[in-house]
Amino acid sequence: MKYDCIIIGGGLAGLTCAIKCSSEGLSTAVISCGASALHIASGSIDLLGYSSGRYLTGDLDTHLDQLIKRKKNHPYAKIGKKCIWESLEFFRQILSKERLNLFSMDKKNHFHITSLGILKPAYLSQRSIFNGRLLDSYKLKKGLVLLNFRGYRDYYPGLAMNQLKKNPLFRDIPLKTGLIELPHYTKTARNMLEFRSIDLARVFEDETYLSKIAEDIRTGAGDADVVTLPDFIGIHNYEKLHARLEEMTGKSIIEIPNLPPSIPGMRIEHALKTSYASHGGEFSSGDRVTGCSMSRGMVEYITTENYSDTRLSAKCYILAAGSFFSGGLKSGYNLIHEPIFNLKVAGGSDRTKWASDQFFSRGSHPFMEFGVETGTDLHPFGADAKKIKNLYCAGAILSGYNPVMEGSGGGVAISTGYKAALEVIKKIKKSSLE
Amino acid sequence: MINLKNISFDQCIKCTICSIYCPVSRATHLFPGPKQSGPDSERLRIKDPALIDSSIKYCTNCKRCETVCPSNVKIADLIQTAKYNYLKKKIRVRDFILSRLDILIRILSPISPIANTLMRNSLVKLLLEKFLGISRRQNFPAFERSSFKNCFKRNMQEQDIYDESVIFFPGCNVNYMDKRLGKDLVKILNAMNIGVTIPDNRCCGVPAIANSNIGRAKKYARYNIRSLKKALGDRDRRIVLSCSSGTLALKHEYANFLNLDTSTLHEKIDYITPYLFNRFSEGRMPALNPVHARVAYHSPCHLERIGGVMYTIDILKRVPGLDLVILNSECCGMSGTYGFKKEYFKISEMIGSQLFKKIDDAGPEVVVTDCVTCKWQIENMTGYRVLHPINILAMSVFKYGLDEYL
């Protein structure tokens, strides 16, 4: 089976890349093994959140400059600032076409509330998670109430409130917590205690209960202007539901990202997949790459579990298989390796140096920066240390950055996925001219 | 000692992603979802079968949980085996009939004009629902008067003139309900200079498996294995099917689920689109003419699981002029005979509602899908006519008009 490009990995990086390629008219296939890490991510996109353990509050353009100067091997340094901003704008537009509009504060971070009451930096957030109206109510010191549904066990607003109270930003903001009921469930055979976020999101999606929920929210909120709820406001029709809920209650309604499965993450996944399908892209889900054939330093074809006898070949391949969790990288006892192409990996020979002694060490863990080495064109190096000219790497499989300590996972995935797509498009257009 | 055959539940990290994508638990809270019904409960059930939760009966075995699992847990297999091993069996008349659809079809086929009218009569349907529990809101497919096998037998000699041959296992759908599909398939293969042999065959056993009639399923399976081996002889030929669930049964379930030996057959069995894809790639391809129609393609759950969707899409994309919309994959809710059962009908309808809406949004002239029960469900619930990819290919090769199929 022949394509212009085959993308291994259907997460944030892989899908961004796939959408860009297919929207430029390339025949594209994505090979994905199981659902992506978006299901366990917050759903906000971080670009660069921290430096040396501090929040980055200033102009991100300057912060990026500093990072690029300091860390030459960082994926951001490889692809450059212009491409980063362009990719985020592209990402924002594809989601907006799927009716998922993202909020950003010029080129600065905003800080959304988490379920533990910590503020977390992000560059792009869904409008129910952070928005301008919330910023204004912070300034005017308007009251905020953290509501939960009675019996829902994955979220404790009291915990979040006590943590928020320690934050100087909330010093003069009246905070309280409250419980509201979901009447529908008292009628079912099942016990509310078994419900996960997805069950509750479905109650919201079925708009029948919306007015009842709105009424409960109004009562529960009292005189507070801002109401926070766990992130349940639907997946497919979320923007409409959120707007209606705000209209019915007259309150500003903020969602707090919660334990997995992540509803905001699924909204993004759904929007990306719909967009990809609308460009005619192909997606092989629940599949695994089982082998590859190399010829003259290039990838000739790959084989997968589902398409066992068939060779899948393409002009270009993109490896966006994720890090250790997603199986893009594997660890042996004294070895970190990339299982499909056996690419050159940075880090990993001496096991004693993989991790710091303390789990919550400030210096983080070295293994977080392990990954595939690439050039500025995102080409990786094969076992013979030569560049593989028709293979590109993107996303969490890359080395040289620490998504947790820097708060950069989302930005790196989107920008490197986008950059890989640009390289592929350039290469294929050039070869078709020749 | 505890029998630990499928211990893939050890790999479960409790991410709950399977439950998100379970079409049944989306439609009803009566089913607690694949995580709880599969890996979570399995640990209890293997210790004491009495700890089984009867809610697993709602699982339709669409296998979407396995498709999305990031940790490679065989969730649906865990649930299916638990259903058969631990759930108390109460064979109902209805389930018996549905498990032996082939008999029903064989009885009704010769009197098809009367039978077809009767089966669509609202009083008959009401009685079927009252006494048997078959939902009156489902339509039974119309039966052909004579079987495909018999029609084919009449001109079997013609098949010897081609320089290659392939075995085609038609299954009940082609035999008794969709003769046109069988004819189209044979004509296409002939146009590729490939002759067709049709072996003696019984029901593939899928309805029997789905209705817990395992003894019957094994009988059918043994019969089919024997007759396929006989047809194969010592010639190196492929065996093709036009039905995605039938392929899943012959290729995987006979061996994995019914514990029968299919080792000599396994490698030779293909769903039709991968077979055609491979032959096309070798250059053996009929000339294609433009088909000017807007079609929406729905990928069936089971084809998705065994990995055949990209082949079908590849074949459809080769047809010039075809305005093809690929629907974002959703379950139609039928799952074999599940949607026929009164107690599940509403759930089945709910499951499919997302797909039906997407079809409406796409506004096609016809819908295309590989699976026959998906076809029944979509035709019944949306009113759109549903064709097989082979029908579309035949339209292109032989310049058939779309109106011939409507």
Image (cartoon, coloured by chain):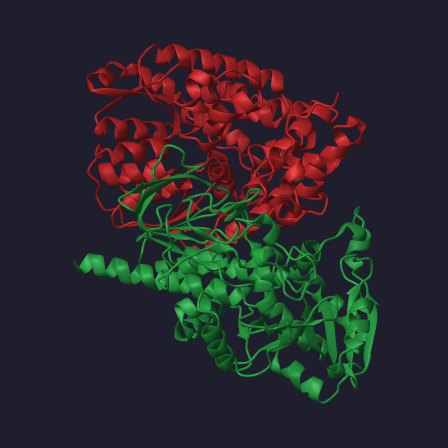
Chain colours: A green, B red
Residue lying furthest bottom = A140
x and y, in percent, of residue B135 in the image: 62, 36
Instruction: In the rendered view, tell whether residue B384 sits above or below residue B188.
Output: below
Instruction: In the rendered view, tell whether residue B2 sits above or below residue B289.
Output: above
- Residue in the picture at 41% in, 15% down: B228
x and y, in percent, of residue A423 in the image: 33, 62
Q: Is residue B205 visible?
A: no
Q: Give whichever of A342, A10 is nearer the camera.
A: A342
- Residue in the picture at 46% in, 22% down: B109
x and y, in percent, of residue B227 in the image: 42, 12
- A38 on left or right of B198: right
Q: Give whichever of B40, A334 is nearer the camera.
A: A334
- A355 on left or right of A421: right
Q: Quadrant of the N terminus of chain B?
A: top right
User: Count of labels shown?
Assistant: 0
- Residue in the picture at 49% in, 65% down: A412
Instruction: In the rendered view, tell whether residue B405 sits above or below residue A250.
Output: above
Q: Give whichever of A164, B113 is nearer the camera.
A: A164
Q: Quadrant of residue A166?
A: bottom right
x and y, in percent, of residue B392 in the image: 32, 40
- B289 on left or right of A195: left
Q: Is residue A381 visible?
A: yes
Q: Quadrant of the C terminus of chain B?
A: top left
- Residue in the picture at 23% in, 36% down: B398
